[in-house]
Amino acid sequence: MTIANTSFKLMFMNKEINEIDLRKLDLNLLLVFSAMMRERSVAKASGRLYLGPSAVSMALSRLREALGDPLFVRAGTSMEPTPRAQALWHNIEPALVTIEGAIRPPTFDPGTTTQTFRFACPDDLELALVPRLMRRLDERAPLAQLALRPSDFRSMYPSLDAGDAHVALSALPAGRPDSRHHVEKLHTETFLAIYDRTQLDQTGKLNMRRFTETDHVLLSVRGDLNGPIDQTLAARGKSRRIRCAVSHFPTLPFILKERPAIACVPGTAARYFADTFDLECSPLPVTSPQFTLGLVWHARLDADPAQSWFRSLVIETLDEVLAPKADR
């Protein structure tokens, strides 16, 4: 145990600690003293500390000189503590236990935790992911709470920095994150088209003509009326008819059930909406844009056992959502 040269005052147990006085004593000697109090034998104490007996004897000699007391006297085959040693041990043992607890890696028991996990999740996955995530929490962490936050690649970093979210699931922006944020890439996502078969009087794959001549409902957080798919179409001299832009994915299937329209949605959400709302799912008649889905968290939570456990739970749940329907 090393005492830094820079001295500052701490308050502990309502008593002021004077680092200057403590610097006069090698605090490693107190660990030797602790081992002697427990073992009452130089040989056994040396085994406990993984030191040679001579090193333990020398440490005891230094401590005796510093405290002006023999500390231990031989009584048969044992070394018995003096009254000064007993009094010293009475005060030092709780402090050593406290220090050991402070530096020991924290433990986490999901079965008893009452922690609130703050999870930023994109709304195209929230409907499919969160009910399954809650089921796992019910089974493994029944006293924990889940607080959902919105997530997209524009807002997730400020949300993580502020502590509004502990972990974010999001489409990952281009480029490397800064050192404050850790990223785990999980899945490459492409887009599919969804529509109501009754409204369009069609089933199966959409051809280019039907795709471009039918109204489209676009997801756009900022209210834009074009996107990467439109750029791909334009490169081929084509365009589509965007009738409406909405800011939340869950709105899309309700619109599609009411009118002949198409929505282009990330594949995982498209398959979920198709199954849940009895919609048709079709590949695009042009090359689909792609993006990487990943988990992002602040570096300060990287080693936190509770957060590490929760991140693993999110990944496990997402794997279930991504699994083929027959495997679920």
Image (cartoon, helix red, strand yellow):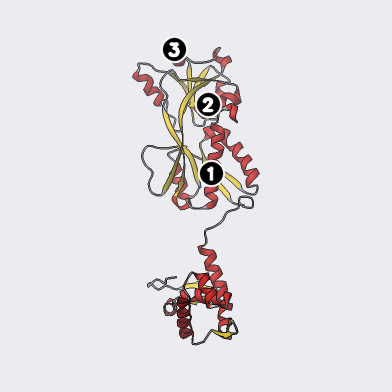
Q: CA distance from mark 1 to mark 2?
A: 25 Å
Q: Position of residue 283 (x, y in %)?
A: 47, 20
Q: Secondary structure at mark 2?
A: helix
> Image check: 215 left or right of 90?
left
State the residue position of label 3: 209
- Counting the numbered discs, the total is 3
Q: Is residue 154 visible?
A: yes
Residue at mark 1 to residue at mark 3: CA–CA distance: 44 Å
Q: Residues within 10 Å of mark 3 (few under 14, many from 20)?
A: few
Q: Name the kind of residue labelled 1 in the image.
A: Ser
Which quadrant is the C terminus positioned in? top right
Q: Residue placed farthest to the front in the image?
A: 77
Give percent across and percent down for residue 285.
Answer: 43, 17
Give 84 or 43, whichever is nearer the viewer. 43
Quadrant housing residue 157: top left
Compute the Cα span from label 2 to label 3: 21 Å
Q: Which badge, 1 or 3, comes first in the chain's sequence? A: 3
Kind of residue indicated by mark 2: Ala
| Along the viewing direction, whichever of 194 and 245 lies nearer the viewer | 194
Q: Position of residue 30 (x, y in %)?
A: 50, 76
> Residue placed at 55% from the left, 78% from the top?
41
Query: Badge 1 is on which residue?
Result: 312
Quarter that holds the N terminus: bottom left
The residue under the point 37% across, 22% down is 232
**Crowd band around label 1 with a 10 angstrom C-alpha radius: few (<14), some (14–19), many (20+):** few
Closer to viewer: mark 1 or mark 3: 1
What residue does disc 2 label? 270
